[in-house]
C-alpha cells in the first residue's frame, strides 16, 4: 500500500501556515526598508511634539520648516541610495507633517 503513495508533496506540505517561501535575504531587505520608514516617522513625531509643547505663533512655522528639510533630505537619500523606502518616507513625512501643522494651527487659534 505504501507503493501507491503520491511522491509529489502537496502545496500544504511545501507551505506550512500559508507563509510564502521568500528567501531570508529578501525578507531582511524588506524589514530594513520598513525600519527606514519607522525611524523617519519617529523623528517626525519627536520634533512635532517638541514644537507643540510651548506652541506660540512661530512654532508652527518652525515645525513646517523642519518638515520641509526632512522631506528634502529623504528625497535626496532616495536618489542617492536608489531606494523606494526613502521616497515612501518622504511622502509619509510630508502628509503626516502637513496634517500635524494644520491641526496645530487650527487648535492654536482657539481661545
Image (cartoon, rainbow, N blue to C red):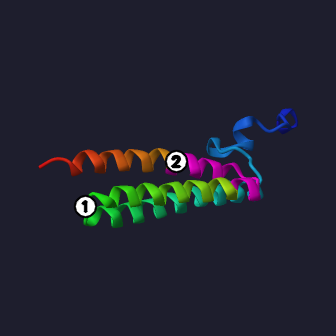
Left or right: 40 as drawn, with respect to 59: right
Is residue 1 or residue 51 the one in the foreground?
A: 51
Q: Which mark is residue 37?
A: none
Is residue 49 shown in magenta?
A: no
Give above or below for 17 relative to 36.
above
Picture quadrant of residue 62: bottom left
Label 2 belongs to which residue? 92
What residue range appears in magenta?
78-93
Left or right: 110 as drawn, with respect to 85: left
Quadrant containing the N terminus in the rendered view: top right
Q: Position of residue 82 (x, y in %)?
A: 76, 53
Residue at 64% x, 49% y is 87
Callouts 1 and 2 close, C-beta under 8 Å: no
Left or right: 79 as drawn, with respect to 98: right
Examine the residues drawn in magenta and state their main secondary structure: helix
Residue at 48% x, 64% y is 43
Q: Position of residue 34 (x, y in %)?
A: 60, 55
Label 1 belongs to which residue? 56
Distance in Å between CA atoms under marks 1 and 2: 25 Å
Task: State how many labels appear.
Answer: 2
Q: Position of residue 30 (x, y in %)?
A: 67, 54
Amino acid at each position: 500500500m505504501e507503493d501507491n503513495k503520491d511522491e509529489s508533496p502537496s502545496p500544504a506540505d511545501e507551505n506550512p501556515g500559508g507563509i510564502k517561501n521568500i528567501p531570508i535575504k529578501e525578507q531582511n531587505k524588506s524589514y530594513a526598508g520598513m525600519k527606514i520608514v519607522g525611524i523617519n516617522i519617529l523623528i517626525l513625531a519627536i520634533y512635532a511634539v517638541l514644537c507643540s509643547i510651548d506652541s506660540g505663533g512661530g512654532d508652527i512655522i518652525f515645525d513646517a520648516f523642519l518638515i520641509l528639510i526632512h522631506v528634502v533630505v529623504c528625497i535626496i537619500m532616495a536618489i542617492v541610495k536608489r531606494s523606494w523606502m526613502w521616497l515612501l518616507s518622504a511622502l509619509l513625512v510630508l502628509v503626516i507633517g502637513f496634517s500635524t501643522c494644520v491641526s496645530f494651527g487650527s487648535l492654536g487659534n482657539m481661545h
